[in-house]
Image: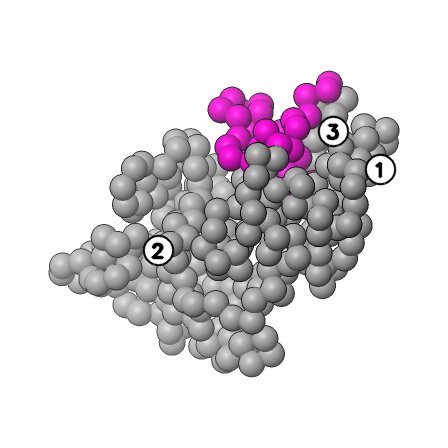
Amino acid sequence: MKGMKARGSIIIAALVLAAAPPASGAEGEGAGSGKGVPPGWSTLTTVHFEFVYHPGASAHVEQIAIGAEEDLARVLDVVGLDDIAPIEVVVCRNTKELAGMKPGQAPPSWATGMALRDRRMVLLSLTAPDGATPTAARGIFLHEVVHVATWDAAGGRDLPVWFNEGLAVWVSGENAFERRKVLVSASLTNDLLPLESLSRHYPGDGRGVNVAYAQSADVVGFIESEFGPGIVRKVLGRVGQSFGEEGGVQDLRHVTGKTEDLARKRIQIVFQDPYSSLNPAFTIFQSL
């Protein structure tokens, strides 16, 4: 890990030198979600990332890239990996551009980031679907990188959605305050979801999706705060090996040695004292 950070510092210090000029003529090989580097786009390389982007996005890309290696080192510590194979990051100016860069089926209209884990590729948009609202690009980048790292740590096995998304949201800390407001509201209106129901997919409605993300992230954070940073690695390994009807809940109990439903225990804490039990500024990084 220390060697990785040292190499990362050298590369990050030379970001300007590492940025390649815009591609000209025919599309290049390899980058851009398997479709090649679009004409006129640029690339920027760090130790573990190759950023592919329109020159108009260069300032945003440099802001992401300058801390990318340090962010990755923290992610690897969370999931228990020493290193990771390089990841391609395609930075799009808007969601329409993102959809055009994704191979195969089009992404959901609301998606501002995607991790194509088996391709070792991350796609992200700098603006929301309305085309005007800027996104928290670094948070989205980190969220999707967590998905790739978690995929590696689980040996390429699919994980319960609540754990996969919860870990990504918790680590990245994106929209922390808004997600906690959603969780508080859902706890007070009795709209919280059974964790088992979030094992294979999230609800299709906007309200349900927001609750699912907020609840998943809070459960993962609660597990980490109860049992320490190392528990995420143990749960990750256990959940990655077995995916039963309860969607990893039994595995969670096995790893923690607790027989009670930890998710339900957390829900009770939130319901009893919703505002003081949620700290919008806290993320898993602060415990490392």
Q: Are marks 2 and 3 in contact (CB under 8 Å)?
A: no
Q: Secondary structure at mark 2?
A: helix
The boundaries of the magenta stretch are: 189-218
The percent position of residue 87, horizontal first and vertical second, equals 41, 62
Q: Secondary structure at mark 1?
A: loop
Neighbourhood count class around disc 3 (C-alpha, 10 Å): few under 14, some 14–19, many 20 upward? many
Give, as a three-letter code, the residue at label 1.
Ser
Q: Is residue 1 magenta?
A: no
Residue 278 visible = no
**Whole-number angstrom distance, CA of label 1 to CA of label 2:** 42 Å
Indicate which disc residue 119 carries.
2
Position of 21 relative to 148 (above/below): below
User: Which residue is the site of mark 1?
Assistant: 276
Q: Tell me which residue sits at (31%, 45%) in the image.
A: 102
Give, as a three-letter code, the residue at label 2.
Arg
The percent position of residue 220, horizontal first and vertical second, equals 68, 45
User: Which residue is the site of mark 3?
Assistant: 184
Between disc 2 and disc 3, whose residue precedes?
2
Position of 159 relative to 77 (above/below): above
Out of 39 and 30, give the one closest to the viewer. Answer: 30
Between disc 1 and disc 2, whose residue precedes?
2
Out of 249 and 140, give the one closest to the viewer. Answer: 249
Give, as a three-letter code, the residue at label 3.
Val
Q: Is residue 198 magenta?
A: yes
The percent position of residue 145, horizontal first and vertical second, equals 49, 55
Q: Tell me which residue sits at (53%, 46%) in the image.
A: 159
**Whole-number angstrom distance, CA of label 2 to CA of label 3:** 37 Å
